Each structure stands twice: as structure tokens, then as C-alpha cells.
Image (tube, grey):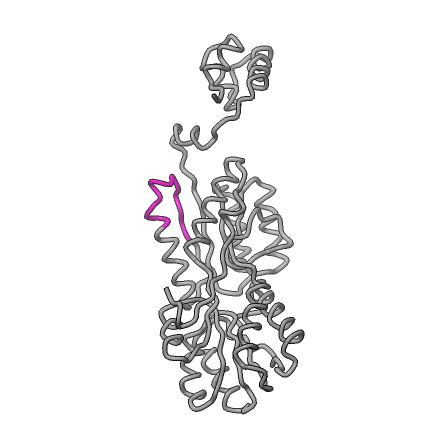
Amino acid sequence: MRPTVHDIAAEAGVSLATVDRVLNGRPGVRGVTRARVEKAIETLGYVRDVAAANLAKGRVYPLVFILPASDNSFMHGLRAEIGQAIARSAAERTAIRTVEVPAFDPAALVSVLEGLRGEAPAGIALVATDAPDVRASVDALVKDGVPVVTLVSDLTASLRHHYAGVDNIAAGRTAASLLGRFLGGIRGRVAVLAGSMLVRDHRERLEGFAAVMAEDFSGLSVLPVLEARDDPETAHRLIADVLSTDEQIVGIYSLGAGNRGLIRALKEQGAGRDLTVVAHELTAHTRAALLDGTIDAILNQDAGHEVRSAIRVLKAKADGLPVIAAQERIRLDIFLKDNLP
């Protein structure tokens, strides 16, 4: 049976109130008495249940989610999942708020992070723009004792505590394998649509995609990346332009958002052409495009799992508790029209 605070009090010959003061680091205990209590804790092998203690004290965890202000379906879904977490706040003892910053704007993100240093929240989760100033701001927060989790896109060179997202290099490699195999050995060009090379998830997906294309599908040449900043209108214009001017394009990999614009361009400019298309994120628009054959495969990450994982990790880090790695691993799903949930 696990030792309790009553066992510590009996072993040290002190009151429960004294044990409580020592466990919580509060003043009012003589040095010799504190040493006696600490010796009893060591002798008994007492391990404090921090979560239970915080529940008893009614601790609430103020958490901040920083998201890009972007009109794309995936970010709408991510915001909706955070809304669901806010609805569970009473049960999970959280006080969650969201802050939006312009997408792909490191200076705006730094400004928000610097402002949060004065608030000292229990934790911060952010969709990161990978820039030196952003890493420096994250590092400063961590050094101040604020837990930080990156969400969807990582900052691997920073001191952030955890990344809640898929393995994006593996995602890019998977996309290349699917696209190359679907094309069945034909030769041609592949267009790549991204949001911005300022974010690590897009760079890593491109890295994985290009590596497999070079290794396994040398008959397919990858065109220079089209950056649409996850904007549907820009994505529509870029894809429509490249399809209208290059008849040798046989495949498209959309590694970011803006898929509404991609789908519209495919229906307008791709009609009558045998194009193979792999994209990211299962939304109402990409689901419909899978069903009608406009898109061949979707790689998906579970935004709800990412949000729940970020909250669990931030609370654990705030309490100094370990993170269960297997529970926080975000799965990469592959959907065809035949296995849609």
C-alpha cells in the first residue's frame, strides 16, 4: 500500500499541518523539523500525487493557444477543436483563450509571445513560424518557467517542451510513394503547392516528398514550389496558371492548405486531363473531391487529438509530471474514397 501523509506525520512525529507545509514549500517550519519530515518522506518512499493535490486545491490552468489568422478549412477545424476544449474547461480545470496572429508573420508572433511573458500562463501552445526571433521568444518563455508546446508545425531548434503534430518528413515521403505508384511509371512533371517555406511542416513535407521522388520515381520531375500562403484564391490562380501553360504535368502534391482553390482550378483547368492529386487534411471540400475523383488521396492529421495532447502535456509540464509518449503520438491517416470515415 502506498504511504500517505498520515504515515509521514506518524514517522516524523509531527502534525498533518506541518507535513502539508513541507510538501508545499511554505514557511513556518523550523529547519530541524523540516529535515525530520523530509527524512520520513525518503524512508517511506512517498511519491506525491500532484494531480490529486491540485484537484483538492481547485487549481485552474490558464492556457493560451496562438493560431494563424487564416481562412482555410484545417484552421477552422483546429479552432473548432479548441472551442470543444473550452467547453470542457470546468471538468478539465482549464481556462483557455486563443490569440490569432497574421499567418506566416514572425514579427507578429514574437510580439504576442513577448506580451505573454508578463502574464506567466500555465502553458502556451502555438502554431509556429520557424524564424530565429520566434525561437528566441519561445526559449525566453521556457527559461521563465512557462511550458510551451508547438502545434501542427514545430520549432525543433528551440527549447519548446513538446510537439503535437505528425512526422512531416514521413508525411511527405508517404505522399510521394502514393503519387508515384498511382502514376504507374509514366513520365512527366509534378507540381507542388505549399503555403509558405517559412513554416517547418511545409519544408519537411517537401523534403520527404522530393527525397522519395528522386530515389524511386526518376521519371517524374518535381517543379519549383508554388507558395499560396494557404489562401484559396491564390492557390486557385497558381494552379490554374501552371496547368494552362504546362501540358506535361501529370501529378500535383498539395502539402499545405488552400485546397478549396486547388479543387476549383482542377475542375476548371484539369477537365479532360489525367491528373493524379495527393493533398493534406480531410475537410468537407477534400472529402467531396475524393468522392468525385478530383483528388486521389488525402493525408490527414487529427486536429482534436493534437489539441487534447497539447493540453495534457502543458498540464503535466506545469505540474512537473512525466509525459506518456505513446499517448501523445499523433497518427498520420491515409484516406481514399474507399475508406472515408
Q: Judge from the rendering whether residue 96 lies leftward or rightward of residue 204; answer left or right.
A: left
Q: Judge from the rendering whether residue 22 lies leftward or rightward of residue 261; answer left or right.
A: right
- What x and y, as percent, mark residue 104? 53, 65
- What x and y, as percent, mark residue 115? 51, 49
State the residue in front, 187 or 54. Answer: 187
Q: In what quadrant of the picture does the C terminus appear? A: bottom left
- What x and y, as percent, mark residue 314? 49, 44
Q: Which residues are magenta?
A: 85-98
Q: Examine the structure image and report whether residue 276 is included in the region drawn in magenta.
A: no
Q: Residue at x 60, y 71 (%)?
A: 209
- Please identify the quarter of the rendering in which residue 208 is found: bottom right
Q: Examine the structure image and report whether residue 95 is included in the region drawn in magenta.
A: yes
State the residue in front, 71 or 87. Answer: 87
- What x and y, as percent, mark residue 294? 42, 80
Q: Residue at x 40, y 67 (%)?
A: 339
Q: Is residue 83 above or below residue 117?
A: below
Q: Residue at x 37, y 75 (%)?
A: 291
